[in-house]
Image (cartoon, coloured by chain):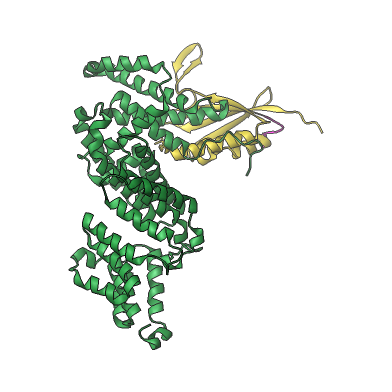
């Protein structure tokens, strides 16, 4: 059975200004383990992206402004790409992502390519 | 859930221990008065590792990677500070020297060991109250967060936070003495360092925190730091060896003290086959190393007592006369009615409950001892053995009311029930 695969862009968002709880070294080691396990589990479908620095620029009608480029409330912290069969499957993968443990974080999943809204 | 291709695993507590190492090394480089800046830099380095390692894989030398990131982080912060605060210029020379050495692979194992040891001596600064010293050591050298320390020492986050602040402000006031402390100069603090480790261990060993792992960790840390101390000429004294002996011999019996349901077991009830023979072996070898020189410290006495228990084949075959003698020696080194209390138990095993009670009746207990649940528990037990049910019940009931933890309460309740068994009542005196 051959299934066509699509690429999904996953944007990891967190709220601006929310008090970020500092993790202890022991907790961070647990987070590291959770992330590596997640990546290993879906390594066929997951294409690691990377972190994004805060700030940036937005151009609108030729005018370049500083951020915030999405909304004042949120910042995109990092991104990843998933290459899989469906949006449902991509959502499944993201649902197992350790990001779920961070209450204020959210992930936007968008299929890449042309299409009608 | 098992990952199909397990991620490169880091050794247990790697981040926590690495954090202690890095803060120690950086604080030596940049000065102990900048310890908070160093802590923040290490925090940032670990955070960056969490973000980058899962995606890019582990660097060849994880410790060097973390050191580089944290080091640059401190440098960056100092440069920003220098731009806004002219007074920082005074230290330019030091900063340049630091920058130059940043290019070297300056993460030598023996150097790191020395730095951690130096930090341990800094924690023992006489200007810091003892309870703050312990908290500070757990934070700086063991990499525990405020919350993690609070959980382990049964205190509120606020209390731990205050103790940390007290330690930090004491250090700030004594900057000049601590800039580049020579290990030789710090040797005079060895007794305080040993006491910190002793208290750290005791905290982990005797607390009845139901989470065994958490208690284990404090004991492990005390042993880890004790070994560090023992590996350096300045710390390798007979007292250090005796303290390590004591810790290993007690650790050998750690797990056998609780039953399957988490209840406390008396020494008499413990399954001696569960005692860790390897740890006992290590403890005995440290004890042998401690037996040199002219010193017989409290750690020698306590380790010898622990060894008597570990090496006795059964409860009945324990050399109680020897243990009673050792408690007497201990009491001469550090006089405390608690030692007399323990000696009375050994004497009761050796010569009967009357001899034990005679010893307790001869002392004039200070008020705090009268409120101490083990005082009543011991009296209750000795009266029970003598067949005096009334007095036994009175003391055990009082002990039960004062016992600090559920496990200890359950144990006392068990004793109290044994005391009031019909068979016992009919049998009278044993």
Residue under the image location 46 percent in, 39 percent down: B13
| Residue A90 falls in image quadrant | top right
Q: Can residue B401 be seen in the rendering of this structure?
A: no
Q: Position of residue A112 (x, y in %)?
A: 65, 24
Residue B372 relative to residue A75: left or right: left
* Residue nearest the observer in this picture, B25 or B357: B357
* Residue nearest the observer in this picture, A15 or B249: B249
Residue B68 relative to residue B197: left or right: right
Figure colour of chain A: yellow
Q: What are the residue bounds of the magenta stretch?
A: A83-88
Image quadrant occupied by the C terminus of chain A: top right
Residue under the image location 40 percent in, 77 percent down: B417
Where B413 sits versus B123, above or below?
Answer: below
Chain shown in green: B
Residue under the image location 25 percent in, 36 percent down: B187
Image quadrant occupied by the N terminus of chain A: top right
Q: Can residue A31 be seen in the rendering of this structure?
A: yes
Q: Position of residue B386 (x, y in %)?
A: 32, 80
| Residue B350 falls in image quadrant | bottom left
Residue under the image location 41 percent in, 51 percent down: B284
Q: For residue B305: magenta?
A: no
Q: Position of residue B258 (x, y in %)?
A: 46, 61
In this view, which residue lies farthest toward the top? A62
| Residue B80 falls in image quadrant | top left
Residue B33 relative to residue B44: left or right: left
Residue B37 relative to residue A45: left or right: left
Q: Position of residue A9 (x, y in %)?
A: 61, 27
Where B312 sits versus B288, above or below?
Answer: below
* Residue nearest the observer in this picture, B238 or A107: B238
Where B13 sits versus B28, above or below?
Answer: below
């Amino acid at each position: 059975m051959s299934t066509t695969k699509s690429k999904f862009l996953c944007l990891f968002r967190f709220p601006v200004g929310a008090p970020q709880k500092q993790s202890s070294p022991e907790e961070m080691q647990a987070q590291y383990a959770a992330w590596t396990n997640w990546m290993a589990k879906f390594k066929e479908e997951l294409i690691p992206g990377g972190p994004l620095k805060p700030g940036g620029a937005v151009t609108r009608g030729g005018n370049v402004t500083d951020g915030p480029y999405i909304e004042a409330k949120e910042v995109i912290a990092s991104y990843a790409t998933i290459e899989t069969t469906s949006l449902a499957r991509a959502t499944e993968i993201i649902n197992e992502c350790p990001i779920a443990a961070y209450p204020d974080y959210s992930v936007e999943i968008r299929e890449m390519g042309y299409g009608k809204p | 859930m098992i990952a199909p291709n397990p991620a490169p695993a880091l050794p247990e507590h790697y981040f926590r221990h690495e954090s202690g190492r890095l803060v120690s090394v950086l604080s030596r480089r940049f000065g102990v008065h900048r310890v908070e800046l160093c802590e923040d830099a290490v925090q940032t380095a670990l955070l960056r590792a969490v973000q980058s390692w899962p995606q890019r894989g582990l660097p060849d030398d994880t410790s060097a990677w973390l050191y580089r990131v944290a080091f640059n982080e401190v440098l960056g912060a100092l440069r920003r500070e220098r731009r806004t605060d002219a007074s920082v210029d005074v230290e330019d020379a030091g900063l340049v020297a630091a920058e130059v050495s940043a290019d070297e692979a300056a993460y030598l194992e023996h150097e790191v060991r020395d730095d951690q040891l130096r930090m341990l001596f800094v924690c023992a600064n006489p200007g810091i109250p003892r309870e703050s010293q312990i908290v500070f050591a757990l934070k700086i050298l063991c990499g525990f967060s405020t919350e993690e320390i609070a959980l382990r020492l049964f205190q509120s986050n606020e209390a731990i936070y205050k103790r940390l602040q007290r330690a930090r402000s004491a250090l700030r006031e004594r900057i000049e003495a601590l800039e580049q402390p020579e290990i030789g100069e710090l040797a005079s603090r060895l007794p305080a360092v040993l006491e910190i480790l002793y208290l750290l261990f005791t905290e982990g060993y005797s607390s009845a925190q139901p989470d065994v792992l958490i208690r284990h960790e404090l004991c492990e840390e005390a042993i880890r730091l004790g070994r560090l101390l023992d590996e350096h000429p300045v710390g390798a004294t007979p007292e250090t060896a005796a303290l390590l002996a004591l810790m290993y011999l007690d650790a050998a019996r750690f797990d056998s003290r609780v039953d399957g349901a988490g209840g406390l077991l008396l020494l008499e009830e413990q399954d001696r086959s569960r005692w860790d023979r390897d740890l006992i072996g290590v403890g005995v070898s440290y004890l042998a190393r401690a037996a040199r020189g002219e010193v017989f410290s409290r750690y020698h006495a306590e380790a010898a007592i622990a060894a008597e228990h570990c090496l006795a084949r059964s409860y009945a075959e324990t050399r109680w006369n020897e243990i009673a003698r050792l408690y007497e020696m201990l009491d001469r080194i550090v006089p405390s009615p608690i030692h007399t209390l323990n000696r009375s138990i050994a004497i009761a095993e050796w010569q009967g409950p009357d001899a034990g009670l005679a010893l307790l009746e001869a002392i004039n207990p200070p008020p705090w001892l009268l409120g101490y649940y083990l005082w009543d528990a011991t009296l209750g037990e000795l009266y029970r053995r003598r067949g005096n049910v009334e007095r036994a019940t009175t003391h055990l009931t009082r002990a039960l009311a004062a016992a600090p933890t559920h496990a200890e309460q359950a144990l006392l309740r068990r004793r109290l029930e044994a005391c009031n068994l019909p068979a016992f009542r009919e049998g009278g005196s044993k």
